[in-house]
Image: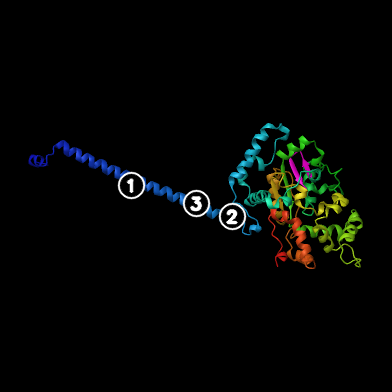
């Protein structure tokens, strides 16, 4: 208790004492609140810090370890969201018959396997590279539209890139279009007969119909290591040379030999060295015109499918076709209707020894000129420059 004497000597009253006590309590409460606020702020900073560490870890974990020698930007999910937003208002304006089908459009694109997202992101980055513009861009000409096959029933476009298993994909589309009930029922001589196989080309439609399909349909094509593809084309057309394609051996091969063979006394048929010298010549087009559409077996993927001008949904790789084929069928929403034919073991594996053997007797100058022509294909689709060019 506070005595009257104490109150008098200090000049304080009971009210003063109460005020002093209240003030002390107020200060204590303020201090406690500030203490809690600082703890909360520290916790927030800790959560943000841990999120940044986790985000960086995820980026480093899933980034392509090889890098493929191209400058790649981090995978930005907002870029995928913009793809969805770009399609949605367009879809709502088109008639029902042109509404897209397939899970790649109706589902969340972010759920696609990371490898396919990275392929499309790499493609976009290289397409924006001004230094490679001449090697990555081409006009969407009739030549390109002739390469794209249409399945209206399931709203699918498939761009043909020969020597990467296209025969099997054509069979898949033939079944989907209803010409045959199963892949096993399709005669081999029908697959490439474009008057009988029931596969219309995109070039057969009017300009407005072409635009609608390019905007809304599920679009895909397959690529392969560019040099290995050239070896496959050379072997198929000039070494084995099927009897139903005599023009490769009797017309095209002599034309290349006359122009590009160094040893005029050599009487053998077309050699791979002649073929490489022809393809690497900056003035190859004058022969291409004479050969016509037969050149589709060795022209670049850029010239065939215009990947920087047409927004493809999926790009499959021949080397991973066992995984890519089922994914493409599922993304297109047709996996319950048809299956990709069985792939023989080892047929899609990149054969480095074979590639090095074919190029071992060819001059570095000719190989570099060949690479200069196909550099766009190497960079756009993540194939590394061959080691024998670096030595």
What residue lies at 70% left-to-right and 65% top-to-bottom?
A: 390
**In this view of the protein, which residue sits in the foreground, 165 or 259?**
259
What residue lies at 55% left-to-right and 53% top-to-bottom?
A: 58
What is the magenta range?
Answer: 148-159
- Disc 2 and disc 3: Cα gap in Å? 16 Å
Is the residue marked by circle 3 packed among few (<14), some (14-19), or many (20+) residues within 10 Å? few
Is the residue marked by circle 2 packed among few (<14), some (14-19), or many (20+) residues within 10 Å? few
Q: Earlier in the sequence, mark 2 or mark 3?
A: 3
Instruction: Find residue 28 and report its horizontal and vertical position in percent.
Output: 26, 44
Tell me the number on the disc at residue 62: 2
Residue 278: quarter of image: bottom right
Q: According to the image, label 3 marks what residue?
A: 52
Left or right? Give the position of 49 relative to 282. Answer: left
Tell me the number on the disc at residue 226: none
Instruction: Find residue 250 and report its horizontal and vertical position in percent.
Output: 92, 57
Q: Quadrant of the N terminus?
A: top left
Please identify the dominant SS of the magenta region: strand
Q: Earlier in the sequence, mark 2 or mark 1?
A: 1
What residue lies at 85% left-to-right and 57% top-to-bottom?
A: 237
Q: According to the image, label 1 marks what residue?
A: 35
**What is the secondary structure assignment of the residue under circle 1?**
helix
Q: Quadrant of the C terminus?
A: bottom right
Q: Which of marks 3 and 1 is nearer the N terminus?
A: 1
**What is the secondary structure assignment of the residue under circle 3?**
helix
Counting every numbered tag in the picture gives 3
Q: Nearer the viewer, mark 2 or mark 3?
A: 3
User: Does the magenta-highlighted stretch encompass residue 66?
Assistant: no
Is the residue marked by circle 1 packed among few (<14), some (14-19), or many (20+) residues within 10 Å? few
**In this view of the protein, which residue sits in the foreground, 112 or 39?**
39
Residue 226: quarter of image: bottom right
Left or right? Give the position of 299 relative to 75. Answer: right
């Amino acid at each position: 208790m506070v005595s009257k004497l104490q109150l008098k000597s200090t000049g304080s009253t009971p009210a003063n004492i109460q005020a002093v006590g209240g003030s002390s309590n107020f200060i204590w409460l303020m201090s406690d609140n500030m203490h809690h606020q600082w703890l909360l702020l520290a916790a927030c900073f800790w959560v943000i810090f841990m999120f940044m560490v986790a985000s960086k870890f995820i980026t480093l974990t899933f980034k392509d370890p090889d890098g493929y020698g191209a400058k790649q930007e981090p995978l930005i999910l907002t870029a995928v969201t913009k793809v969805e937003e770009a399609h949605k208002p367009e879809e709502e304006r088109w008639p029902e018959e042109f509404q897209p089908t397939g899970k790649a459009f109706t589902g969340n694109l972010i759920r696609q396997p990371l490898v396919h997202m990275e392929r499309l992101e790499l493609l976009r980055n290289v397409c924006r590279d001004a230094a490679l513009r001449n090697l990555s861009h081409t006009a969407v000409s009739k030549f390109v539209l002739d390469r794209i096959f249409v399945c209206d029933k399931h709203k699918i476009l498939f761009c043909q890139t020969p020597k990467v298993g296209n025969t099997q994909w054509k069979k898949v589309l033939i079944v989907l279009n209803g010409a045959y009930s199963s892949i096993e029922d399709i005669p081999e001589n029908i697959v490439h007969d474009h008057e009988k196989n029931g596969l219309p080309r995109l070039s057969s439609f009017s300009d407005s119909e072409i635009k609608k399909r390019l905007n809304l349909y599920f679009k895909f094509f397959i690529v392969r290591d560019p040099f290995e593809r050239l070896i496959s084309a050379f072997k198929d057309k000039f070494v084995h040379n099927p009897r139903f394609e005599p023009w490769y051996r009797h017309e095209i091969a002599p034309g290349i030999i006359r122009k590009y063979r160094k040893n005029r006394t050599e009487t053998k048929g077309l050699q791979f060295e002649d073929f490489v010298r022809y393809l690497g010549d900056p003035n190859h087009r004058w022969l291409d015109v004479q050969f016509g559409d037969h050149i589709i077996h060795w022209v670049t993927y850029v010239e065939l499918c215009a990947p920087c001008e047409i927004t493809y949904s999926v790009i499959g790789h021949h080397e991973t076709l066992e995984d890519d084929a089922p994914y493409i069928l599922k993304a297109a929403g047709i996996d319950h209707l048809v299956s990709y034919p069985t792939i023989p073991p080892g047929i899609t594996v990149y054969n480095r020894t074979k590639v090095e053997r074919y190029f071992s007797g060819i001059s570095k100058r000719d190989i570099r000129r060949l690479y200069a022509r196909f550099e766009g294909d190497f960079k756009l689709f993540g194939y590394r420059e061959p080691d024998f060019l670096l030595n």
